[in-house]
Image: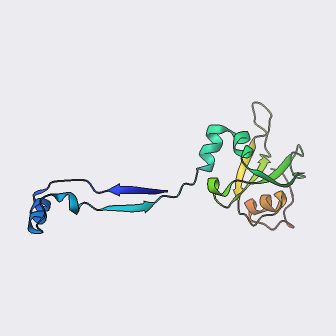
Amino acid sequence: MIVHTFRPYTRSPWLVSLGRGLGLHSTQRLIRIRPVEVPIVRDFRADVAQYGIGAVLEVCELIGEPEVDEGHPAKLNRALWRPPADNYGPDLILDCFNGTPDEQTGLYERVLLRVPDTCRTPREAASWTYGVDADAYHLVRRT
């Protein structure tokens, strides 16, 4: 998308004298219009907050099958999604649950995390969020 930006049209004495010196009867020709590229990339977090997780995942493509998170206390599923490239860029979305239940409700919060498109499985994506290799990623102790 190209958006045109305009310099403010002012009739300062300096600009008027410059225009007259150049033989112009109007300063209109001195105003330049320059096209500026504006990338249209939607804000992932704002969309999740405004529309909800379900609506964001509706436009995404599921990669593989959801897998059980063995390290999660409730053994809930996690999944990897590919959003449309024109919406959120090349990153993938990891759909998982927080490991600590809410103190008031006792429910686990569902979260969406952006991960690089080099991740191939939900386990690999989850390990990336902790900065470890997928083979070394396992729960040692929940604190």
Q: How does the figure colour the protein chain or chains?
A: rainbow
Viewer-closest of 108 and 84: 84
The residue sitting at 74% across, 40% down in the picture is: 54
The residue sitting at 67% across, 61% down in the picture is: 90
Find residue 142 and report its horizontal and vertical position in percent.
83, 51
Picture layout, residue 137 above or below residue 55: below
Is 141 left, or right, of 1 in this rendering? Answer: right
Determine the residue located farthest toward the top in the rendered image. 104
Is 21 left, or right, of 83 in this rendering? Answer: left
Total labels: the figure holds 0
The residue sitting at 61% across, 38% down in the picture is: 50
The residue sitting at 75% across, 30% down in the picture is: 104
Find residue 51 and report its horizontal and vertical position in percent.
65, 38
> Residue 115 lies in what quarter of the image?
bottom right
Is 48 left, or right, of 31 in this rendering? Answer: right
Viewer-closest of 6 and 45: 6
Is 36 left, or right, of 121 in this rendering? Answer: left
Find residue 14 and report its horizontal and vertical position in percent.
11, 62
Picture layout, residue 19 above or below residue 96: below
Find residue 138 and report its horizontal and vertical position in percent.
87, 60
> Residue 85 lies in what quarter of the image?
bottom right
